[in-house]
Image (spheres, grey):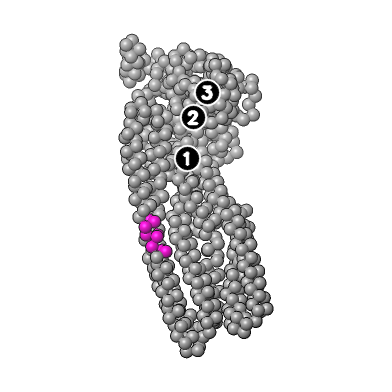
């Protein structure tokens, strides 16, 4: 897993190598200092040779300064490598998300994806930035200092053969228990993000129903869950330091006890013991570094596993069967189509749906709530793939079109379409960046945007708030229709996208679409019969099946379901 994670460092790998070189060189110069100090005490101080003392002292200062410079360099290069790895991981996840189908996105919660793109990446990023130095320095210092310690006094160094296994066992027990806790902690962050996202997205509903107190309680519960998970994980992780200190001080006491005996027996000099203690402290500090690195890696591995889940998610809609072809006319065929959202679902959402739409034809799709109207049109641009049967455009199965071209040739306007931050003009050009102002104005005339554009503060350059909060629901729908028209698709799908528009304006839009875009295939999904009664044909859906097909007059004459819808809407209008 670590190799895969670090493979996303890309061009920043050179900074990681430079950091390793700097840390290694820094360790070498730091390890020279105790040797020089031992000589200074045993030779210079013992003989009273001032010149020797100054010479060794200057050598120690030079080594310390060089080690300081190398330490600064390693910190800088480590930070660059960590930031580069974080950027690479975020980019890889975000790029993979753009290839997800709706089914793939349904597999993850949006809040969880946000956490994986931010918090999880930050964990790994920080582990590299702050952990690169101890990760390299710890082993180098450990093996080098241990070797020197054994060369100074092999009898005294035998104490490490007891201390190291004891520390390794304690560290293993801590890490094996804390790793699953880190995964639970990240899941708790997902929960908190979900609560915040839902509250902010539906803030108008919350205020309209005066549910602020309930939302505060819900957040407090999620926040308390995160606190409990964090406390449990960090309480166990915090045992790492006491375990290290227990081993460290026990080792120092043991060395002082046995070393004092060796000095008393004349088998060891004071300067030698001082130098030995310096290396002991180096060894113990390196062990502390290594244990801290293991703790950071434990959390990073939990985050890394979550990140790789996003990257490794198998995209179920691909261009595997695609050919280099384009949609030319825009006829649509459904040939015995069956569909369900999950393979293990018991019931199909769509059952044995078959119909043909001619290129340039205007077709209405109507049915009761839950009749699977929106599901049906999502199969045309392959937002979902059919479970059985086949969807064809211009007689060619949609699987054989490159997805980028297929979706570019089909424009879908949803009831709750989204406007993005930026100017109104930027939003209109979202589907066609190189559109001229003449094309923009023509699309706006067809969608009746020109009726209110002059009333906006800066016209086409008016800044849209997040999600288009500074325009009404009907204005937002008309802007989304204009955006889709500007794309000049072969097939235009309006999924109940005039629900917030008054009847007169809806009639103008419908008339303009028929008169000015006669060659464009138009599929209109609506709840109101008035929205589709002038269509060339109407497809009546009932419980995921095609109940009947015909003009408004034909369906009104023979379809009981259509008659019930018509009468209920007529009665509502009369009231």
> Would you say residue 69 is visible in this rendering?
yes
Residue 296, position in %: x, y? Answer: 47, 58
Q: Pick whichever, 294 or 156, lies toward us.
A: 156
Front position among marks 2 and 3: 2
Q: Residue at x 63, y 69 (%)?
A: 61
Q: Pick whichever, 512 or 320, lies toward us.
A: 512
Reply yes or no: does residue 179 show up in magenta. no
Q: Are marks 3 and 1 in contact (CB under 8 Å)?
A: no
Give the SS element for disc 1: loop
Range shown magenta? 233-241
Q: Quadrant of the C terminus?
A: top left
- Quarter of the image for residue 64 reads bottom right
Reply yes or no: does residue 234 show up in magenta. yes
Q: Which residue is mark 1?
A: 101
Identify the residue at the far top of this view.
574
> Would you say residue 394 is visible in this rendering?
no
- Answer few, some or many: residues within 10 Å of disc 1's Cα (few below 14, many 20 plus, some between 14 and 19): some
Q: Residue at x 52, y 67 (%)?
A: 138
**In whole angstroms, how far apart are the C-alphas of marks 3 and 1?**
25 Å
- Answer few, some or many: residues within 10 Å of disc 3's Cα (few below 14, many 20 plus, some between 14 and 19): many
Residue 295, position in %: x, y? Answer: 44, 60
Whichever of callouts 2 and 1 sits on the residue coming sooner in the sequence is 1
Tell me the number on the disc at residue 479: 3
Q: Which residue is mark 2?
A: 467
Whichever of callouts 2 and 3 sits on the residue coming sooner in the sequence is 2
Above or below, 564 against 331 in this view is: above
Above or below, 261 against 288 in this view is: below
Q: Are marks 2 and 1 in contact (CB under 8 Å)?
A: no
């Amino acid at each position: 897993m670590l190799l895969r994670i670090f493979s996303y460092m890309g061009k920043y790998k050179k900074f990681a190598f430079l950091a390793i070189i700097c840390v290694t060189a820094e360790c070498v110069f730091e390890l020279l200092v105790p040797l020089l100090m031992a000589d200074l005490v045993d030779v210079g101080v013992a003989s009273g040779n001032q010149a020797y003392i100054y010479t060794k002292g200057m050598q120690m200062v030079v080594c310390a300064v060089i080690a300081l410079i190398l330490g600064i360099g390693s910190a800088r290069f480590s930070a660059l490598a960590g930031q580069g790895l974080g950027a690479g991981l975020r980019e890889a996840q975000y790029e993979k998300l753009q290839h997800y189908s709706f089914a793939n996105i349904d597999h993850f919660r949006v809040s969880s994806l946000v956490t994986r793109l931010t918090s999880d990446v930050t964990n790994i990023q920080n582990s590299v930035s702050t952990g690169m130095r101890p990760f390299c320095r710890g082993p180098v210092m450990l093996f080098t200092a241990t070797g020197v310690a054994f060369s100074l006094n092999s009898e005294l160094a035998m104490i490490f053969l007891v201390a190291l296994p004891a520390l390794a066992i304690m560290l293993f027990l801590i890490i094996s228990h804390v790793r699953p806790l880190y995964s639970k902690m990240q899941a708790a962050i997902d929960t908190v993000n979900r609560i915040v996202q839902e509250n902010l997205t539906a803030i108008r509903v919350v205020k309209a129903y005066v549910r602020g107190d309930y939302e505060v309680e819900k957040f407090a519960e999620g926040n308390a869950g995160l606190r409990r998970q964090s406390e449990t994980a960090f309480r166990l992780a915090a045992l790492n330091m006491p375990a290290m200190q227990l081993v460290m001080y026990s080792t120092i006491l043991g060395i002082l006890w046995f070393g004092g005996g060796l000095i008393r027996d004349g088998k060891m000099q004071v300067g030698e013991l001082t130098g030995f203690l310096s290396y002991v402290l180096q060894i113990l500090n390196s062990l502390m570094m290594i244990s801290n690195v293991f703790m950071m890696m434990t959390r990073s591995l939990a985050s890394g596993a979550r990140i790789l889940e996003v990257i490794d998610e198998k995209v179920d809609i691909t261009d595997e069967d695609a050919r280099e072809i384009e949609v030319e006319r825009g006829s649509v065929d459904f040939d015995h189509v069956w569909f369900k959202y999950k393979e293990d679902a018991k019931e199909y959402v769509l059952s044995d749906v078959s119909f043909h739409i001619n290129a340039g034809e205007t077709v209405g799709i109507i049915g009761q709530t839950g009749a699977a109207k929106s599901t049906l049109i999502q199969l045309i641009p392959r937002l979902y793939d059919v479970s059985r049967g086949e969807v064809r455009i211009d007689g060619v199965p949609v699987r054989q079109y490159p997805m980028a071209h297929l979706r570019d040739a089909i424009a879908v306007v949803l009831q709750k379409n989204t406007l993005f931050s930026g100017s109104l003009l930027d939003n209109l050009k979202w589907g066609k960046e190189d559109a001229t102002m003449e094309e923009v104005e023509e699309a706006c005339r067809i969608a009746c945007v020109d009726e209110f554009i002059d009333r906006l503060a800066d016209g086409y350059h008016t800044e849209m708030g997040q999600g288009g909060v500074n325009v009404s629901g009907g204005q937002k729908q008309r802007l989304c229709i204009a955006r889709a028209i500007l794309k000049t698709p072969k097939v235009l799908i309006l999924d109940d996208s005039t629900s917030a528009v008054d009847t007169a304006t809806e009639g103008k839009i419908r008339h303009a679409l028929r008169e000015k875009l006669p060659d464009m295939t138009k599929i209109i999904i609506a709840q109101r019969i008035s929205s589709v009664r002038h269509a060339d044909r109407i497809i009546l859906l009932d419980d995921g099946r095609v109940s009947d097909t015909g003009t408004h007059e034909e369906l009104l004459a023979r379809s009981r379901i259509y008659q019930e819808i018509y009468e209920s809407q007529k009665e509502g209008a009369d009231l």
